Amino acid sequence: MSDIEIWMAIGLLLLATLITRGSFFLLGHAVKLPPKVQHALRYAPAAALAAIVMPDLVTMNGAVQLHWMNPKLMAGLGATVFFLATRHLLGTIIVGMGLYTLLRVII
């Protein structure tokens, strides 16, 4: 790709981002989303986070590893159990990272 094509691609992606994200601000009062769509959109951040985190937890050395020798998976499960028991987000991060560090050294 030439420099001009790269800059055109960046410009078009910028324009697409501004149109899709900015339309909610510009047309926010004119367009009303149905209540079911609004309810479904509340789960979008959690779904996006799960889509980013889960593949990293289950892969090790580029392959899916669903066994107890995967320290990332075990630390993720431990952090999940801690969160479900306490509902403390900062504690969950600390416990998850602590478990990961400990399991990485032990395994």
Image (tube, helix red, strand yellow):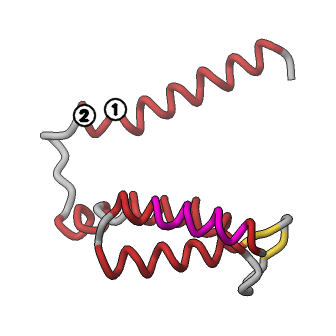
Q: Dot 1: what SS?
A: helix
Residue 56: x and y in percent read: 67, 64
Marks 2/1 in contact by CB < 8 Å: the verdict is yes
**Main secondary structure found in the magenta portion:** helix
**Which quadrant of the structure image shows residue 91?**
bottom left
| Residue linked to disc 2 | 25
Q: Is residue 87 above or below residue 7?
A: below
Q: Looking at the rendering, in which quadrant would you find the C terminus?
A: bottom right
Q: Looking at the rendering, in which quadrant would you find the N terminus?
A: top right
10 or 32, nearer to the observer: 10
**Which quadrant of the structure image shows residue 68?**
bottom right
| Residue linked to disc 1 | 22
Q: Identify the residue at image location x=84%, y=72%.
A: 63
Q: Residues within 10 Å of mark 2 (few under 14, many from 20)?
A: few
Q: Amino acid at mark 2?
A: Phe
Q: Identify the residue at image location x=36%, y=57%.
A: 90
What's the mark number on residue 12?
none
Q: Dot 2: what SS?
A: helix
